[in-house]
Amino acid sequence: MFQEKPITLYWKTNSQVCPSPTAAMSCRPPSRSLIIRERDTEYQLIRIILFDRLLKAYPYKKNSVWKEARVDIPPLVRGLAWAALLGIDGDIQAIEVDIPRCHQYDELLSSPQGHIKFRRVLKAWVVSHPDLVYWQGLDSLCAPFLYLNFNNEALAYACMSAFIPKYLYNFFLKDNSHVIQEYLTVFSQMIAFHDPNSATI
């Protein structure tokens, strides 16, 4: 009988052969100038994938970002990489990751101009509230205010800033576990009052 053997794929780049996709991340370029490396599309693709993974795991992968930056930084991610190297708040980078993939249901909010406005409003909120942090979902909270005030970002920001302390007090603390527990307790009490049968399930 034939025994099935695992297939290993290889990615050849810069005269090196690296197992793909994980081990290819650790391949080091030969001693070529930065200009030549930046024009090598295969090499740049590998570096972009690597930095994308590292930056999404920032600040936990901060040391790895520093290590790879000493080799080179792909031009496409140079802005975010420098932000990480300079110790810029991870909230800003989280916004950059979230915005492009969110709100595809709406033509206005998913447009390039919508992304620009999202970034400005959310970054302004993060910077002006140093005691709070960006949690995934803040962009969804911002969405209706930005949609209604698309040509007035200041008003969208003011509405969101007034809404959060009134209806989501302390929800965006760095450690918000006890706050979420309080919300869940209130929610459970509401279910018990309106639908006792569901509450006992």
Image: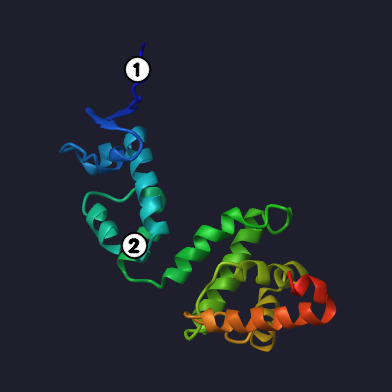
| Residue 159 higher or lower than 140, as above or below | below
Neighbor class of circle 1 (other Cα within 10 Å; few <14, some 14-19, many 20+) is few
Q: What residue lies at 40% left-to-right and 51% top-to-bottom? A: 52
Asked if residue 79 shows in the view, the reply is no
Most distant residue in the left direction:
31
Q: Position of residue 63 (x, y in %)?
A: 25, 62
- Residue 112 picture quarter: bottom right
Give the quarter of the image for residue 17.
top left
The amino acid type of the residue labelled 1 equals Gln
Amino acid carrying label 2: it is: Trp
- Residue at mark 1: 3
**Residue 167, x across and y down, in percent:** 69, 84
Numbered label attached to residue 164: none
Which numbered disc, 2 or 1, marks the residue that appears first in the sequence? 1
Residue at numbered disc 2: 82
Q: Is residue 54 above or below residue 185?
A: above
Of residues 59 and 162, the one drawn nearer to the viewer in this rendering: 59
Residue 16 placement: quadrant: top left
Please tell me whether mark 2 sits on a helix, a strand or a loop.
Answer: helix
**Which quadrant, please, contains the C terminus?**
bottom right
